[in-house]
Amino acid sequence: MGLFDWLKPKRPQRGPTADGLYGDMGRGARWTGGPDPAGDPELFIPDSAAYVFDVVEWRWDERLWVEVRTNSDGETAGFGLIMGLSDGTKTDAAEAWEHKPGRGPVLVERQEWTIPRGHPTREIVLVSHGEPTTRVLRKLEQCFGFEPHVHPALPDKSAVFCPLLMLRGIVRPEEGRFTMRMKVVLQEQNGWPYGEFFLNINSVRRQLWVSEKDGDYRQAILTRFSDFSAAT
């Protein structure tokens, strides 16, 4: 270390720290994406614009299995999700690119790390529960200001595979703690439009909530989870 290296801004840690912290920030930086998922779990709560669910099943073994429900106009609405977990040997990496005049995109940094055992990989499966998930779609249409569609959600047990990005929070399998803000990516494929949304989990409070990243992704979210081969 050089004499004045301590004056340099701290480089953000892209993977988890030894304490299970994701989204490590430089000295003096503050989390601005709402309540800090890495802080007190009792303070990590959804805002008024989020769609909130109660966690009714939580199984953290070779995978993380989660079932969530809420009440929608007097009836149960909900879905399931499965996260792939590392066995302690899986690796991940992140790259930073800059556009240089005359050179185009240039790789300026690459960080690699081993994903700790029991921590999520970049894989998530969203599972339909049939009619309860259809009620989720109807609620989203209402929140988005759309007319209700005639298409139900995908059939019961149908799955949508998505990339998952860990943004900020703490994962500690030995404590059963998973307080995390994540981003789910709906990839453009088979004619489906691209989309993204935020997925938040607080295992301490037994809550899960979803929130928008951009209003332009609303149609993509509804399309991806609708069954266009059937009508209600």
Image (cartoon, rainbow, N blue to C red):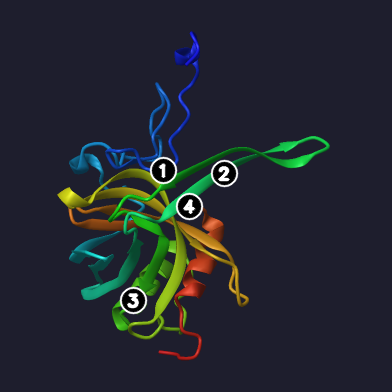
The relative height of residue 204 versus residue 144 in the rendered view (above or below) is above
Residue type at mark 1: give it. Answer: Gly
* Residue in the foreground of this view, choosing between 183 and 95: 95
* Residue at x-position 32% and y-position 48%: 180
Rounded to the nearest whole Å, what is the CA distance between mark 1 and mark 2? Answer: 12 Å
Q: CA distance from mark 4 to mark 3?
A: 21 Å
| Distance CA(mark 1)–CA(mark 4) | 22 Å
Mark 3: amino acid: Thr
Mark number for residue 133?
3
Q: What is the distance, in whole Å, between disc 3 and disc 2 at their CAs?
A: 36 Å
Of label 3 and label 2, which has the lower sequence position? 2
The dot on residue 213 is: 4
Question: Looking at the rendered structure, which numbered label has been put on residue 93?
Answer: none
Disc on the earlier residue, 1 or 2: 1
Quarter of the image for the C terminus: give it: bottom left
Q: Amino acid at mark 2?
A: Glu
Looking at the image, can residue 204 be seen?
A: no
In the depicted structure, whether residue 135 falls above or below residue 171: below
Mark whose residue sits in front, 3 or 1: 1
Along the line of sight, the residue nearer the viewer: 17 or 139 = 17
Vertical position of residue 55 compared to residue 95: above or below:
below
